[in-house]
Image: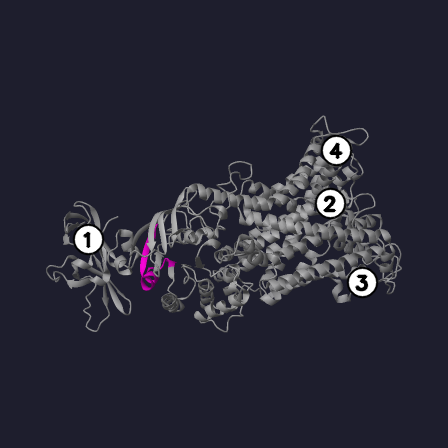
Amino acid sequence: MGCGRRLGGAGVSEENGEPDGDVEPAEGLDPPQGDLTTTESVLTAEATPRFERAARRADAWRGFFFAAPTYLYMLIFFVAPLGIVTMYSFATRNRTGGTDLEGWNLASYARLDEPIVRTIVFRSLWLAVVTTVICLLIAYPFAYFMATRTPRVRNLMLVFVMIPFWTNFLVRNYAWRVILENDGIWNDTAEATQTDTVVDWLLDLPHWMQWAIPDWIENLPSPLFSEVGIVLGLVYGFLPFMILPLYASIERIDLSLVEASRDLYASGRQTLRRVLIPLSKPGIVAGSILVFVPSLGAYVTPQILGGDKETLLGSYIVVQFLTARNWPFGAALSVVLLGIMLIATQIYFRNEGRTL
Amino acid sequence: MSAGPARPRGTTRVALTANAVLVYVFFFAPIAILAVFSFSDDRLVGRWGGFTTSWYGDFWADELLKDSMWMSVRVAVLSTFVSVILGTMAALALERFRWKTQRFFDAVLYLPIIIPDVTMAVMMLLFFTWGFDITNDVFGTEFSKGFGTITLSHIAFNISFVSIVVRARLAGMSLELEEAARDLYATRWKTFRHVTLPQITPGIAGGALLALTLSLDDVVITQFVSGPGATTLPVRVFSMIRKGITPVINAVSVVMLVASLVLVALSLLIQRLRGGSITG
Amino acid sequence: MSDALAAVTLGGLTKRFDDVTAVDHVDLEIADGEFFALLGPSGCGKTTTLRMIAGLEFPTEGSLQIFGDEVGTLPPNKRPVNTVFQSYALFPHMSVLQNVAFGLRMQKVSKPEAMGRAQEAIGLVRMDSMENRRPDQLSGGQQQRVALARALVNSPKVLLLDEPLGALDLKLRQEMQRELKTLQREVGITFVFVTHDQAEALTMSDRIGVMNEGELLQVGTPEEIYERPVNRFVADFIGQTNLLDGTVEATGTVCLSNGARVGVDTEGVAVGGAVAISVRPERATLHGRGGAPPGRPSVDGRLEQITYLGNALVFTVALDWMSLDVRVENQADLDVREIGSEVSVSWDADAASVVQE
């Protein structure tokens, strides 16, 4: 830069040509006010600061005009519901299972300290963390492998990650239910009516491969209706959410840096730890949050693969509304869940920008 | 990019390749198995009993399932239509103008993307229950949950996803193009019509497909705002699964799977037309 | 200026972004048919000035006239000017022909006529047979020509060019410089050209306006700007120069920092004023110590470095308080001295100019 002043021209167009940025409109919560003089309607005259302000204001009005319908919609159908949940979380449950919108209190939040609630919250956090770590361990080598392929292969591999990404989540979880269902594809503990289950197949492998099959496989119960089943379903559901941001950030890395690192006597492991992982940190953080957040609030997967035996936060909230009829408590739990999400995403924004 | 030492070799290479193969098997084997067993002539869902298409026939004969399927389609199409218009306008407002309370609007628009399904479901349930209690009491209306509440809720989350996709496209478009059009005597409207709109069309189409997919996928939020007897296919299937799985569910699932795959194919096609990489 | 109506007249033109002044009270007249360059480092306000003329930015205050009409408050689509953008800004979804016809179509010219005139303009920039290509199928130089045709087809009263050659490589750049100059003479339209490349400005323009930090420092022909820079910044920014600090001792005499007195034209500077003498390296001559012809201003020093440039050599001479470059054409009878030898440097009294801060 030749001089210390703010860039004209080129610099401004990089900033979307909106040189007034966020500074000008930040005078309060009202939409821009003032005369709606459009630039077209002003008679030709010498430019004045007043004219420039009016033109900018007219532009601000145009922006507000485009946003207005959506703004209104979101205020009614998103912000208001958010307010109402918060309101309910301070309300009282009456004896008939209804909710009295009076006698505001913190009783629902106080219940968070109950052992059963704490157990559920920590179990949910634990399963979400386990799911995230497993996804990371599978996805990182996968994404690296993908990033080091030729562009053609890379794009093809990407397509086949996009397919599960776009495929109906419920169906994908249900597919595992079909596989793991007792007396089905996985095993048949009840009757010996069927031989070609996965467990049988493992036991039927040739002798030279048997060393890899532990003895207990014969009595291996299906992971269905257990924490293992839930994690399996979550990993299956959210693995693409981890792969895509990881791939995006690894692909951006100049891989000659890996070569430079090897050239400077780093081992493969050292290169991974000191070069690749630090450089792909934005992808790691983004992917982890994209997996962690929905895992924590998961409801469908635990219902289908967990059999509701291991209650998690998502199911517990739903129960408050559909069966226990304790709406204030359910609302309080929802608010807490949202709070955890906001904290997680704040971590992300602090790390990276806004691009997921 | 060079393909030198950055490309793993030796055991690392074998391990990475094996991992990649296993990931793909993991992704696609369950779907394939589900598809195969939807044609199995056995009451037990996971057992092969010869080929049949009767489960599909049972699905087609089930009025409840068929009703909810049409409900799904109607909700998806209508919510996509509305959210594409609103989301695109919001994207334009955020990317091309500066105005007061913009940051607040931006944050509000961002929340539905990160909010857990369950929380949003609870929000919508309480909002409609509370709102209908008031309007029905005060104005004597007879609002109840059903198609309308489902669609309104779907629009609320779809707007955010559409606007994010369109914004990305707008942000990637050089501002000089619009300035050039203005310089070449185009009015604001003509600039939008002849330059901006053609440039962001792939983004709008991508956003629309995403909205369709999300709408057709949603279980939790829809379940909370459904009325008695009136709900979407995924919610109906979900409640059937909870009662116990049957081969008919296999058949319905495969139909839903095919719908998803069609949408994937369309989105891939759009990306191909866009001429960029898949992530574009 | 003659009494003919100026193509562009800026009067106290100012642009402020928040509390930053990008363009500061610029007064300027650009004559009809002139090839005018706005020259300055990045961020000096030259592009903002151009954008204000185009209507892409509204002035904070001041007057902006095109052939006598006040246009400062008109939107870009109502101004009789067209722009060639830095990145060309060709519409990627339109063919070359559609791009070039765009401006005419927006002015509601009938389709056949617009297409015909667009074809003509495409011919003018020698892009015939390319009219059905898409911009991404063209090279940088070809895109540049299309951008030119797209602007010129509207017969603007003034053509604005924002660093149009910045994205081209050196060879193509020089070729396009010649072509632009020829084209401008052919069409007779006023060109206002923004560049940070002083060599480009000197080569192409009839007149140059040098800007820095939002201010227009000097306007003049390339020769005036080069030979008689008004201040230190202009002298330093245009070409290479040696700036010898000193004070005006008496009219026509400057006392340098080391106490040496040299004769130079000090017109317009009060006695006692701090100045610098600008001596262009190619106007200075190297001699053995004391070998400077009497009457010529000179300073003594020691030869420090010789830089070989191929067509010329640059001798860097260390004085007591600074070093000074002397540029000599590479000729057969070149008298090369040894590094470290004691030398004198002299120059033509009328080739040096006095500049103030």
Q: Residue furthest left?
A: C294
Position in image of residue C348 (x %, y %): 17, 60
Residue type at mark 2: give it: Ile
Subunit of label 1: C
- Would you call the spot at circle 3 few (<14 residues within 10 Å), some (14-19), or many (20 or more)? some
Residue type at mark 3: give it: Val
Badge 4 vs badge 2, beta-carbon distance below 8 Å: no
Residue drawn at the location 37% of the way across and 60% of the way down: C190
**As rendered, which of A77 and B26 lies closer to the eye?**
A77
Position in image of residue B200 (x %, y %): 59, 56
Name which quarter of the figure residue B140 lies in: top right
First in residue order: circle 4 vs circle 3: 3
Which label lies toward us, 3 or 2? 2
Residue A56 is one of the magenta-drawn residues: no
| Residue holding disc 1 | C320
Q: Are marks 4 and 3 on the same chain?
A: yes
Q: Give the spatial CA distance, label 3 vs label 1.
A: 92 Å
Badge 1 vs badge 2, beta-carbon distance below 8 Å: no
Mark 1 residue element:
loop
Which label lies toward us, 4 or 3? 4
| Residue holding disc 4 | B134
Q: Are marks 4 and 1 on the same chain?
A: no
| Residue holding disc 2 | B221
Position in image of residue B47 (x %, y %): 85, 60
Q: Give the spatial CA distance, label 1 vs label 2.
A: 82 Å
Residue C209 is one of the magenta-drawn residues: yes
| Residue holding disc 3 | B36
First in residue order: circle 3 vs circle 2: 3
First in residue order: circle 4 vs circle 2: 4
Subunit of label 2: B
